[in-house]
Image (cartoon, grey):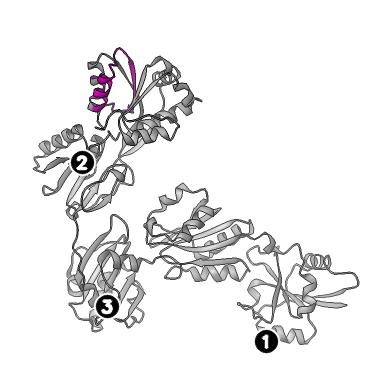
Amino acid sequence: MQIQVQILAPVFNSIYHQLNTVLPKGTEIMVSSHRYENRLDTQQLMAMLMKGVDCIVVPTDKVHYPIHDEVSVVAVLANETDMLNPLLLLGLNQEKAQLFSQLESDLRIGYGRVAIAGFGPGNPELLTIKTQRLIEEADIIFHDDLLDDAYLSAYKAEKIYVGKRKGKHSAHQGTINALLYKAVLEGKKVLRLKGGDPLIFGRGGEEYHYLRQRLVDVEIVPGITSALAAAADAVVPLTSRGTSTSVAFTLGHDALYNQLPKADTLVFYMGASQQKSWARRLVKEGWPGNTPVVCVRNASLPDKEIRRYTLDELLTSKTVLPAPALLLVGQSAGQNGYLPAKKWLYTGLDLKYFKEEGSVVHNPLTELQPLTLDEKSTRMLQNIKAFDRIVFASPYAVHHFIQALFSLGLDTRVLYRNELTSIGVSTSEALMQYGLNVKPASGGNSWQGILEALKEAKVSNESVLLPCSDKGLAKLPKGIESIGCHPYELKLYKSVLPDKAVRHNLEDFYGVVFTSPASVHHFFQLYGTIPAELVLRVRGNYTQKVVEEYISQLGLSNQVLVCKDASEVEV
């Protein structure tokens, strides 16, 4: 049997050797090499078949995509001169092309796979179950400007940021395509994670076709686009019986020059910086000046902001919401039953302690960082058996204490001689994570409860270790002394104002919840003052005292209420 192969690539000898190794005995291969500058279409390929060519080898970019069904891709071969532009072995004569089906050099044998998935508008709770599974399984994740990209830090995959936002481009689209393909060549499970939905202004189609052109296994997983999240946040029906029977998505920065879509409701993406300009254009094109406009910033997230205008009001407004913001325009944007609930700013670390009625924006104003163990602290931990009792006043004290033990090459087995006391339920839960089953000292979740429990147990003349922050514990050490014991503070961590703390517009809130003295100090460090009409809720009497000191110093008159469920000290 004779088989004729035409090679339209500069690597003749290498390709000839690869093809010849799989041919059965008695098969003669006739190979010719030609230079071809233009792209081959299906008609040209069929013409080559009519001239007796059975297979061709051609660079990916020299053949029209998608390849017609009459032409089979027998193998994908490495291109020594351009890794990103592999060579395709195309079968024109299907029967003879089967002779090359066992090529071990077919790159597809070692290919990884790719999923292009939508992360949604930013809130991880809106992830689809499938995208969540893909995040867990991925070897490498290429992600955009996800509004909550810290969410990915808990997963094993390598993370590479390839976002593109106005004014700070990280990677061009061609670079992103190349990174995806290189990861595929390494056999990795690749996740391309995009904000919103991959196919709505996300360039997911471009990346999909780039990879499919190279015969990569790719799937697209939809996500919730920010228009849907914004509409839900602002209670704006994108379609409404009798008012809006059509909706169109458009790019805000393109709306200045391109033809505007014809629809009852318009949603403008990526146009926050030019919203006055396109609002002027809408009015010029005949949209009534009293047409409702809703702007939603950080849709789906706790710190979302919502502004309502008409087109005329938007044109004269002195303040507009900055990016990332999305705007909804149309009569349906004015039809809503939205009644804002009491909105609280929660400054604590753990949102599970929020018990107030209404909605909540979680903005932790405390970040705990471990201290470097000094000589005194090291000696305490290495001689832990010298203490009769260890009292844990917060879950954070537990975690930092155990980590300090680990840093010295110790573990919980060294605690077999120590009595352990926990201030409350969550502290006991933290101890249980390390295999230490310690019941809460009392149901009161307070330092007074600990003292009452120790008194009831007739504890006295004990040396008591108190793991804590660099600020120490306000009243517990003196309380320990009052029952005849000897307290020793072990300072293991410090509380700082987080670099990523958000400075919200406090006028948008009903009240603020403070969970520790540190959260109070950091709040006033960030804001300087507080509107007099805000209600202040605090956890614990000492936190209340610190708040009232600030109110007195600043001459404010805010109402301060102690949370009914005041639980253990937070830091």
Question: Above or below — where is 383 with respect to 302?
Answer: above
Per the image, label 2 sits on a secondary structure element best described as helix
Q: Mark 2 or 3, which is nearer the eye?
A: 3
Residue 275: x and y in percent read 27, 70
Numbered circle sitting on residue 43: 1
Q: CA distance from mark 2 to mark 1?
A: 73 Å
Crowding around mark 3 (Cα neighbors within 10 Å: few <14, some 14 to 19, many 20+) is some
Tell me the tag on residue 424: none
Q: Amino acid at mark 2?
A: Phe
Residue 23 x %, y %: 84, 69
Give the side of residue 456 with respect to residue 414, left or right.
Answer: left
Determine the CA span between mark 2 and mark 3: 45 Å
Q: Earlier in the sequence, mark 2 or mark 1?
A: 1
Q: Quadrant of residue 467?
A: top left
Point out the stretch of residues depicted in magenta.
Answer: 449-478
- Label placed on residue 524: 2
Q: Residue at x 17, y 70 (%)?
A: 316
Magenta region includes residue 545:
no
Asked whether residue 454 is drawn in magenta, I would say yes
The answer to the question of whether label 2 and label 3 lie on touching residues, with beta carbons closer than 8 A, is no
Residue most extreme to the right: 26
Q: Is residue 270 visible?
A: no
Amino acid type indicated by mark 1: Gln
Q: Which residue is mark 3?
A: 240
State the residue at coordinates (24%, 81%).
Answer: 243
